[in-house]
Image: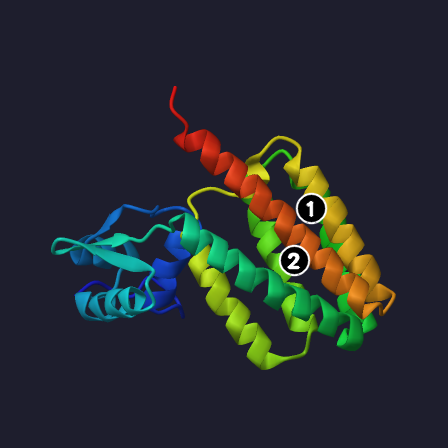
């Protein structure tokens, strides 16, 4: 039996993280034995994790094999509608409930992220941390849980919208507007600013997808 090299993370978290960071991309086949060797755990927890991920529609069947699922245009649109509303609500509640220290952390994140504008994968990870901080600043555990589910599905996007030329700098300016509204305790402005941010990200993703699928 393989020794546990995974620390405190279980097989589900390990596979989900691997999908999230792009080790496994939409369409990639997941094999129990290979996953067990990679993560240093036995095949039983791997099998259970794969079943759980399939139930959550993060994996799909291709014959007898399980592959990382992909999002079609309609699924992508539906996901962004839900994300926009939930993230907007998180910003609204953060404007109402965030402690001054939480706002300060958000401001520091933006300053640190400026160094990452030429590194889209790193900026994408930082972007998730920034949004997660807003979720937590809402001080609503049920909203945070729902946003966690949304972000799990977002792991099925093979690329980041932040890879588009100039998008990183624009996104940081949008982050600044969101935090400024939260700091000013302007709930409507925070809600609107975050919804604009998500809308712009969706437009960029649709543009990138159309270029990727266009005929030569």
Quarter of the image with the C terminus is top left
Residue contact between numbered discs 1 and 2, judged by CB atoms under 8 Å: yes
The image quarter containing residue 98 is: bottom right
Q: Residue at x 77, y 63 (%)?
A: 190
For mark 1, give the secondary structure.
helix
212 relative to 1 in the view: left or right? right
Furthest-left residue in view?
64
Query: Is residue 2 something that shows in the picture?
Result: yes
44 relative to 122 in the view: left or right? left
The image quarter containing residue 119 is: top right
The spot of residue 23 in percent (x, y) is 36, 46
Query: What numbered label is drawn on residue 113?
Result: 1
The spot of residue 140 in percent (x, y) is 64, 80
Nearer to me, 104 or 131: 131
Furthest-front residue in view?
74
Q: Residues within 10 Å of mark 2 (few under 14, many from 20)?
A: some
148 relative to 64 in the view: left or right? right
Q: Residue at x 78, y 70 (%)?
A: 95
C-alpha separation, residue under disc 1 versus residue under disc 2: 9 Å
Q: Residue at x 49, y 64 (%)?
A: 150
Q: Is residue 22 above or below residue 58?
A: above
The spot of residue 74 in percent (x, y) is 42, 52
Q: Is residue 159 above or below residue 46?
A: above
Query: Is residue 155 something that shows in the picture?
Result: no
The residue that mark 2 highlights is: 130
């Amino acid at each position: 039996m393989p020794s546990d090299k995974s620390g405190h993370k279980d097989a589900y978290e390990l596979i989900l993280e691997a999908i999230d960071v792009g080790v496994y991309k939409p369409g990639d086949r997941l094999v129990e034995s290979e996953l067990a060797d990679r993560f240093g755990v036995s095949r039983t927890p791997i099998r259970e994790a794969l079943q759980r991920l399939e139930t959550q529609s993060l994996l799909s069947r291709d014959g007898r094999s399980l592959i990382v699922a992909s999002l079609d245009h309609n699924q992508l649109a539906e996901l962004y509608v839900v994300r926009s509303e939930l993230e907007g609500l998180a910003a609204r509640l953060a404007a109402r409930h965030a402690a001054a220290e939480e706002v300060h952390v958000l401001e520091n994140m933006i300053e640190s992220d400026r160094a990452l504008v030429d590194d889209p994968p790193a900026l994408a990870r930082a972007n998730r941390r920034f949004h997660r901080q807003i979720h937590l600043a809402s001080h609503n555990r049920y909203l945070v849980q729902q946003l966690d589910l949304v972000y799990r599905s977002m792991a099925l996007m093979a690329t980041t919208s932040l890879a588009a030329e100039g998008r990183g700098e624009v996104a940081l300016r949008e982050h600044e507007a969101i935090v400024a509204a939260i700091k000013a305790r302007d709930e409507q402005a925070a809600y609107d600013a975050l919804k604009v941010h998500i809308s712009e990200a969706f437009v960029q993703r649709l543009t990138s997808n159309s270029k990727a699928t266009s005929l030569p």
